[in-house]
Amino acid sequence: MSQASHLIFLVALAVFIVTVPFLGAVAGGQLVNTVLFTLVMLSGFTVLGVRRGTLLLAMALLVPGVVASWINYYRPESMPAIVHLTFALLFLALVATQFLRFILRAPRVTVQVLEAGISTYLVFGLLWALAYLMVDGLNPKAFAFSVAGDSMAQSAIYYSFVTLTTMGYGDIAPVSRVARMLAMLESTTGVMYMSILIARLVGLYSTVTPVTDDETD
C-alpha cells in the first residue's frame, strides 16, 4: 500500500460521506452520487496491495458492483439497488479487512497507519449504511422515523454514523429484528474498534526507542 493510494481513498471516502446527504435536494444529485460512489470503489481497489488472490477477489466484487450501480442509475427497473449494494458491501468489507491487517502488522506508527485507521472507521460507517439500505429495501417497515417525510434512503449514512459513535439521538429507531441486530453490531464494533485502535497505536508508539542526547552527538 502506497501513501498516495491511502490518501486518495481517504479523501474520496470523506467527500462521498459528507456530500451524499446534500445531493438529494439538487438536480443531478443521483448522478453525482453514482460518480462519487464509483470513485470510492476504484480508489478502494488501489489500497488492496499486490496479493494475487486478494486482487482477483476484489475485481470479482468491484466490476459487477460498479456496473450494477450505473445500470441502476440509468435503468432502475431492470437492476434493483440491492444488487450493487451487496457487491459494494462485500467489497468494502474486504477493504476494511486489509486495512485492519495492515494496522495490526505495522511495526511503528506512520502517516499510513493513521490514514488506514481513519479510513477503516469511515468504511465501517459506510458498510453499515449500505446494510441499512438493503434491509430497508427488503422491509420498508424495518425502521421507524420520528421526523415526517424522512426515509432510510435519505438518512442511511447519518443513522449509521450516529449508531457507530453510540450517540443515538432517537429520531430513527430499528424496528425489525434484523435492523436491531445490525444496529447492535455496529455500536459494538464502533466501541471495540476505537479501544483496539488506540491500544494498538499506543503500543506501537511505546515500542519506538527514543533518541537520546548521546545518539545525536
Image (cartoon, grey):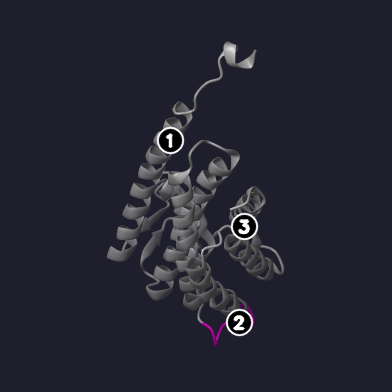
Q: Which residue is mark 1?
A: 198
Q: Which residue is mark 3?
A: 16
Residue 148 visible somewhere in the drawing: no
Name above or below for residue 157 compared with residue 206.
below
Asked whether disc 1 touches disc 3, contact meaning CB atoms under 8 Å apart, the reply is no
Q: Residue at x 27, y 64 (%)?
A: 177
Q: Which residues are magenta?
A: 73-79
Q: Earlier in the sequence, mark 1 or mark 3?
A: 3
Identity, as a three-letter code, of the amino acid under mark 1: Ile
74 in the magenta segment: yes
Q: CA distance from mark 1 to mark 3?
A: 26 Å
Q: Residue at x 44, y 51 (%)?
A: 101
Callout 2: SS: helix
| Mark 3 Cα-neighbour bin, 10 Å: few <14, some 14–19, many ≥20 | many
Q: Residue furthest left?
A: 177
Q: CA distance from mark 2 to mark 1?
A: 41 Å
Q: Earlier in the sequence, mark 3 or mark 2?
A: 3
Q: Residue at x 42, y 32 (%)?
A: 203
* Residue 110 spot, x, y in % from top left: 57, 38
Identity, as a three-letter code, of the amino acid under mark 2: Ile
Q: CA distance from mark 3 to mark 2?
A: 20 Å
Work out which quarter of the rendered image holds the C terminus and state it: top right
Q: Is residue 106 left or right of residue 195?
A: right
Q: Which residue is mark 2?
A: 71
- 168 or 193, which lies in front? 193
* Residue 27 spot, x, y in % from top left: 72, 68
| Mark 1 Cα-neighbour bin, 10 Å: few <14, some 14–19, many ≥20 | few
